[in-house]
Amino acid sequence: MPSVFIKTFGCQANKSDSERILGDYLARGFVETNSWREADEIVLNTCSVRQSAEDRVRGFLLNLDKYLKETGKSKPKVILTGCMLHFNEKELKELLPEIDEILPIAEVGFNQKVVRKDKLNAWVPISTGCNSFCTYCIVPFSRGREKSRPEADILQEVESLVKEGFQNINLLGQNVNSYGLEKSGITLRKLYMDKENFQESSIPSNESQYFRPTTTPPFVQLLQKISAIKGVEKITFFTSNPWDFWDELIEEIAHNPKIDRFIHLPVQSGSNRILKLMNRGYTRESYLSLVERIKVKVPEVVFGTDIIVGFPGETDADFADTLDLVQKVGFKVAFVARYSPRPGTASYKLYPDDVPARVKKERWDILDQIANKDNLSVRPLIP
Ligand code: SAM
Ligand code: SF4
């Protein structure tokens, strides 16, 4: 039987996609191998969030080349999928000539049997893509517009997971809060990025760009339906963005003991000036007020976050605001990344990457130290 090796780069969403890709391969008569040296086909499920993630894909292919030259073995078929598909086919073939095929993740779909690697936690995607266009982020380009999975499909998957013995259900989406809303157009933010010649003045003011649903948000309804399934013990969700963390969602968490008390709430920066340049759609005040409202209703809550240091133009004063916010919230875990300009994004086009690497590293170190001193756990994304 032919064998396949799947190499996954990046986040949990990619790991979940790889479980589906493997399911698809097994259904086509392949076996999985844990050694790329033995594989007939190699799938590279790529990440583009930072340049270093793309460099690692190049590194993998260089190793493969070297190995084939040394051993004289014939080349396995190499298939590329994931976030590097923000490059077009021609660009990819130039950048990574070893690639034989490009696989858009949408072609894999949700219909085959998923091969789950984690035996306790099941990862269930509820949406793909993103409508948010944070200025630094490649995801809206690599993954396209936000698209929610039909509720019935998700519930059916959860029911069969429970039958298989899973108790912990982890819902995945770039912004789970906006689940189900793109159909009605309620949360569609101004797609200023789609304009041909966008300018800084096109970036909407903080908090001016979001709409509230008038009925119970579909994500809250989904949580209610999943927790009603017998056998589901715990529901966790990633990622929940601060701008549409509805009051109804806070109430649901407060009254639903099956919902995890860990909430990942990426803040990215504690400076209003930088938040605006990032097009994050909230201020430090509104973020802190949201945290307070959640703490009041869910006293046992613990927060996690993502922070970018060294965004273009970030001054010492901006960074001090971030440190101050980190101390005020008391995050349990923080994924800290140094800003990496991504070609094609708004920040790449509009702002020079002017914070020196040394300063980015210093700020990264300081965040780490402050957090440790306060007995928080701040985890580096890039050491
Ligand atoms: N949708 C989630 C959100 O809004 O926070 C996560 C998106 S992204 C896949 C994961 C994290 O990568 C972001 O939260 C951000 O901290 C980091 N990131 C994204 N683009 C980056 C860039 N250009 N440079 C450095 N870090 C970046
Ligand atoms: Fe990227 Fe912002 Fe979308 Fe998260 S919400 S995926 S950071 S554009």
Image (tube, helix red, strand yellow):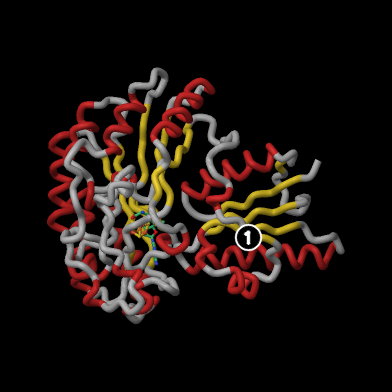
Left or right: 67 in relation to 372: right
Q: Quadrant of the N terminus?
A: top right
Q: Is residue 20 visible?
A: yes
Residue at disc 1, secondary structure? strand
**Is 297 placed above or below 268 here?**
above
For disc 1, the neighbor class at 10 Å (few under 14, some 14 to 19, many from 20) is some
Q: Quadrant of ligand 2?
A: bottom left
Q: Is residue 264 visible?
A: no
- Disc 1 designates what residue? 102
Which quarter of the picture shows residue 253?
top left
**Is 371 placed above or below 85 here?**
above
**Residue at 29% of width from left, 60% of height from top?**
268
**Residue at 20% of width from left, 65% of height from top?**
271
- Number of labelled discs? 1
Q: Quadrant of the C terminus?
A: bottom left
Which quarter of the picture shows residue 251?
top left
Which quarter of the picture shows residue 369?
bottom left
**Residue at 33% of width from left, 79% of height from top?**
197
Give coordinates of residue 199: x percent, y percent.
27, 78
Left or right: 43 in relation to 212: right
Give coordinates of residue 270: x percent, y percent.
21, 61
Outermost residue toward the right in this view: 72
Label 1 lies in ligand 1 vicinity (Cβ under 8 Å): no
Give coordinates of residue 378: x percent, y percent.
34, 53
**Is 180 placed above or below 362 here?**
above
User: What's the residue type where badge 1 is placed?
Assistant: Ile
